[in-house]
Amino acid sequence: MSVTLHTTQGDLKIEVFCESVPKTAQNFLALCASSFYTSSPFHRSYPGFMIQTGSPASASPKVSTSIYGSLFEDEIRPSLRHNARGIVSMANKGPATNGSQFFILFAPAPHLDGKNTVFGKLVGQDAIDTLEKLEAVEADAKGKVKAEAKIDHVTIHANPLA
């Protein structure tokens, strides 16, 4: 399964690892299908590390919710690692605190292995080009994004290669 996040900087196509992390994938895909991520800002960015999004446009960047009614447990898989640019992973505040927020790596971050649930990866050159544009978006020293960068809307694809 895959989705395309249509952002202000271009498209990010994500292959979602449904079989490996089913609860995380179900949460992410249901939020995508409900338009939850429409207008969601990229609110935190650290060039050379990652960019984060997933709060509703009308809420504080600290808001993270799930389809399960509360935050949910991690699905850490040793085979899914923070080992490359374009890895997509759940943002959390510690064990069992997954909600709607997620991040995309600009570079490998092995120190996150075992701490955050990897649930996808970017696919295609367009996504890599868009990630490069997102990495260039200005952020302050605390990672707060200063320019407009948001998810306009999401398209869900049945075929990850579609």
Image (cartoon, helix red, strand yellow):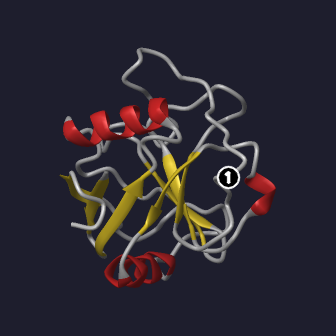
Percent of width and height locating residue 44: 54, 58
Q: Is residue 135 visible?
A: yes
Judge whether 110 appears above or below 106 on screen. Answer: above
Percent of width and height locating residue 27: 39, 32
Q: Is residue 109 left or right of residue 99?
A: right
The residue type indicated by label 1 comes to Ser
**Which of the two residues, 1 or 105, is positioned nearer the viewer here?**
1
Q: Is residue 82 left or right of residue 137?
A: right
Disc 1 on helix, strand or loop? loop
The residue tagged 1 is 79
Percent of width and height locating residue 134: 43, 75
Q: In the rendered image, which quarter contains the C terminus?
A: bottom left
Kindly identify the residue that appears in the image at 76 percent across and 44 percent down.
114
Kindly identify the residue that appears in the image at 63 percent across and 71 percent down.
84
Q: Is residue 83 left or right of residue 43?
A: right
Percent of width and height locating residue 13: 32, 66
Q: Is residue 63 visible?
A: no
Q: Residue furthest top?
A: 69
Q: Is residue 15 left or right of residue 161?
A: right
Q: Residue furthest right?
A: 111
